[in-house]
Amino acid sequence: MSSTSGSATADKPKSEDSSVPQRPSEALSKDECLELFRLLYLARYFDVRLIKEKKRGRLRGTLYSSHNQEAVLVGSLFGLQANDWISPIHRDMPAFFLKDIRAGWRNPERKGMSIEEVCCQVWGKVGSPGRARDNWSHIGKRDAKIIHSTSMLAGTIPVAAGVVLADKLNGGNSVVLTFNGEGSTAQGIFHEAINFAAVHKLPVITIVENNQWAYGTPTELEYSLPDFARRADGYGIPGLIADGQDVFDVYDKVMQAVEYARAGNGPSIVECKTFRAYGHGDHDDDRAVRYREPDQVEKGRERDPIAVCRKKLIEKGYLKGEAAKKFFAEGKNAAEVTDEDFPPEVVEYLKEGIEFALKSPVPDEAEGAMWVFKENA
C-alpha cells in the first residue's frame, strides 16, 4: 500500500487480482450504499437535534458539533467487524451508536452503544455508561469494544496499541481505529505511540480528522506540510488521504488500511480532509466568527457530505425520481432544518433515545464516590 495515495502495491496481494474491486466501495451492494446515505442523515440529525434541545433549555453542558464531518465517522466505521475496537474523540459522539450499527439499529446484541445509552450520557442520567459524571464523550464500553475517550487527543493511541497488542498475544485478529484532530499530531505522545505501533506491527489505524482548525489555530500554523498524512513517512508506514466529505472515499481508504493491518502489516494513518462547521464547541461559536471569515466558512461547507453522497447515488442509479428529491438536509444549519428534512425512521430513532433519557432518573447521590476509590472486594 502506497504511503502517498493509498493505492495498492505488491504488499497487498488482493488488489493485484483483477477480479477484486480496486476500490472496496465497489463491492458494496445497493442496499449498503443506501444505508450509508441513511447513516449520514442519522449522524446529522443527532447533531442538530441536540443543538435545538440546548436552545430550548432542555439540555445543559457543552456540545461539540460533528456537523459537516459525518462522512468521516460513517465511512470509517461502516466496514469494521463487530469485535474491532474504536477510540473516538469529543467531536465523534455519533460514533458511539454508529459502531456495529449494520447489525441492526435496535439490535441489543450488537457491539456498540444504544441510542438510549448515548442520550442518557448527554443528559447525565442513570442509564449512561459514565453514570452522569460527564454530559459528553468521556465514556467507553469494554464489551462494545469502545475505548474510553479523553480530552487529551492522541492520548488514547498508546492505549489502543496496548489493547490490540493484548488481543494479538491472545490469538485475536481485531484492529483498532483511533480518531484524532490534526492538531494532536504535534504532540509527543502521538509520535511515541505511532512509533511503538510501527515497530511492533500493531493493527492501529489512526484517523486524522483534519477539519482545518485546532481550536482557533489554522493548519498552516500547526504543520509545515499541507498533508498531515505525511506524518506517517517517518515511521515507514502508509499515510493515506481521504476526501472527508465523501463517505465512499473515506470507506475506501479506511478499508485499505484495515485490510493491510489485519494481514499483519501494521499501522497506517488516514487523513480525512474536512471542515468544522461551527466553533470548537458551542462555547466557542461567538468567538469563531471573529477568527474565521464568513466566506471561508461558506467555502469549507459548500461540499456537504449528504449532498456529495446523494450525487453519487444518483450517478449509480440507486436514487431515482422522487426518492432523489426527498429529505434535503444538506446546506442547512441547525436552525434552518426541520424534521421534514430527514427520513422519518431517523427522526423516530433519535426521538426514542431522547425521550428515554428525559424520563430516566439521575443516579442516586450515594454513587458520588463510586469509581473514585478502590472498593472492597
Image (spheres, grey):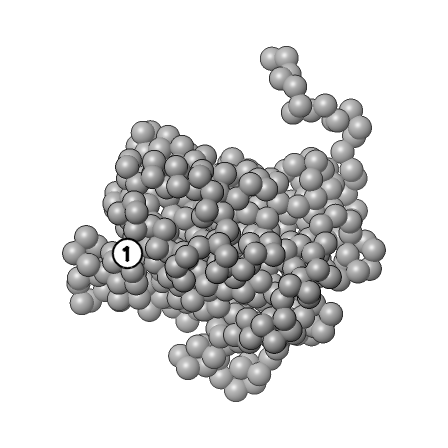
**At 65% from the left edge and 59% from the top edge, which residue is drawn?**
279
Q: Nearer the viewer, residue 15 or 187?
A: 187
Q: Residue lying furthest top in this view?
A: 376
Q: Quadrant of the N terminus?
A: bottom left
Q: Can I make out residue 120 in this image?
A: no
Q: Quadrant of residue 124?
A: top right
What amino acid is at disc 1? Ser
**What x and y, as percent, mark residue 134?**
69, 40
Q: Percent from the top left, x then y, of residue 24? A: 32, 63
Using residue 234 as the reference point, say whether residue 329 is left or right of it: right
User: Does residue 268 appear to the left or right of 63 in the view shown?
Assistant: left
Give the tally of numbered discs: 1
Per the image, label 1 sits on a secondary structure element best described as loop
- Quadrant of the image containing the C terminus: top right
Q: Residue furthest bottom?
A: 321
Percent x, y of residue 328: 61, 77
User: Above or below — where is 262 with respect to 289?
Assistant: above
- 8 vs 257, left or right, is left
Residue at 39% across, 41% down: 191
Position of 22 relative to 298 (above/below): above
| Residue 214 seen by the camera | yes
Q: Residue at x 67, y 62 (%)?
A: 288
Is residue 134 depicted above or below 185 in this figure?
above
Front one among 220 and 326: 220
**In the figure, is residue 276 to the left or right of 116?**
left
x and y, in percent, of residue 324 in the image: 53, 82
Q: Measuring 45% from the left and 34% from the top, which residue is drawn there?
A: 159
262 and 81: which one is in front? 262
The front one of 44 and 278 is 278
Q: Is residue 16 above or below residue 337?
A: above
The residue at which mark 1 appears reads as 3
